[in-house]
Amino acid sequence: ILNVEQSPQSLHVQEGDSTNFTCSFPSSNFYALHWYRWETAKSPEALFVMTLNGDEKKKGRISATLNTKEGYSYLYIKGSQPEDSATYLCARGGSNYKLTFGKGTLLTVNP
Amino acid sequence: DSGVTQTPKHLITATGQRVTLRCSPRSGDLSVYWYQQSLDQGLQFLIQYYNGEERAKGNILERFSAQQFPDLHSELNLSSLELGDSALYFCASTPWTTHGEQFFGPGTRLTVL
């Protein structure tokens, strides 16, 4: 994997459904994996920053895991709510401090 | 509100012109990053400054330049503008050069006609 890739590109779920997205990234020279939540007409807001293989982070109904050896991270949302509708971005931090972002997963939660 | 401010919010200009986008980081943050969000593209890293010095460079065109001033605000200068430069430009700040979370400003929407 040369770039940061996210799947799926978009997702429609019903309120109350649980869902997950994938972020794949180059595992060499890895320093950190970021997840951001980006609502329409707002700016990206950090959810998690993970650095260690096996890291798991949780914030309310949202959690994330990290596998640096194989180069992937999962973001989980339990019991999706309409206010969870947003684009979820992941970004890989390398040794040169810059973040390389994926194109995001657009989540729409229907009431 | 992240504490990062960007001006102007919207900018409409013509091809060949030059514009300056301004960013004020959160109070105390020393590091400023600039990103470009074009249609169908992810956030593209342009450049990073730390305490007045350029720290990392990404896919920034030669027509673009940036600087960070002693009061830590930063400016992104875009010259000889082309239609393809139309995009949303974000700046983000962090306390120092780390891999910690970045705090994004509201962005400047640039439209080149």
Image (tube, rainbow, N blue to C red):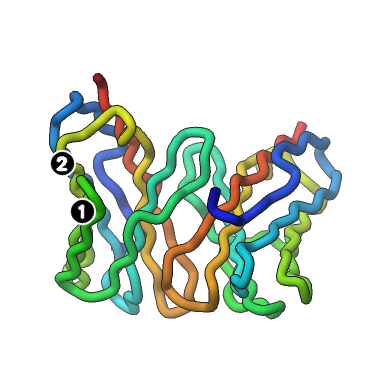
User: Could you tell me if residue A83 is visible in this image?
Assistant: yes
**Type of amino acid under label 2:** Lys
Kindly state the secondary structure of the residue where label 1 is placed: strand
Place residue B53 in its image quadrant.
bottom right
Q: How far separated are the C-alphas under marks 1 and 2?
A: 8 Å
Judging by the rendered image, the residue that carries numbered circle 2 is: A78
Circle 2 residues within 10 Å: few <14, some 14–19, many ≥20: some
Left or right of A49? Residue A53 is left
Query: How many numbered dots are placed on residues in this image?
Result: 2
Left or right of B79? Residue A107 is left
Q: Is residue B9 above or below residue B24?
A: above
Left or right of B113? Residue A32 is left
Q: Is residue B9 above or below residue B33?
A: above
Q: Are marks 1 and 2 in contact (CB under 8 Å)?
A: yes
Circle 1 residues within 10 Å: few <14, some 14–19, many ≥20: some
- The mark found on residue A63 in the picture is 1
Kindly state the secondary structure of the residue where label 2 is placed: loop
Task: Choose the circle earlier in sequence order: 1 or 2.
Answer: 1
- Residue B103 image point, x, y percent: 51, 58
* Pick the front one: A41 or A79: A79
Q: Is residue B92 above or below residue A70?
A: above
Q: Quadrant location of the C terminus of chain B?
A: top right
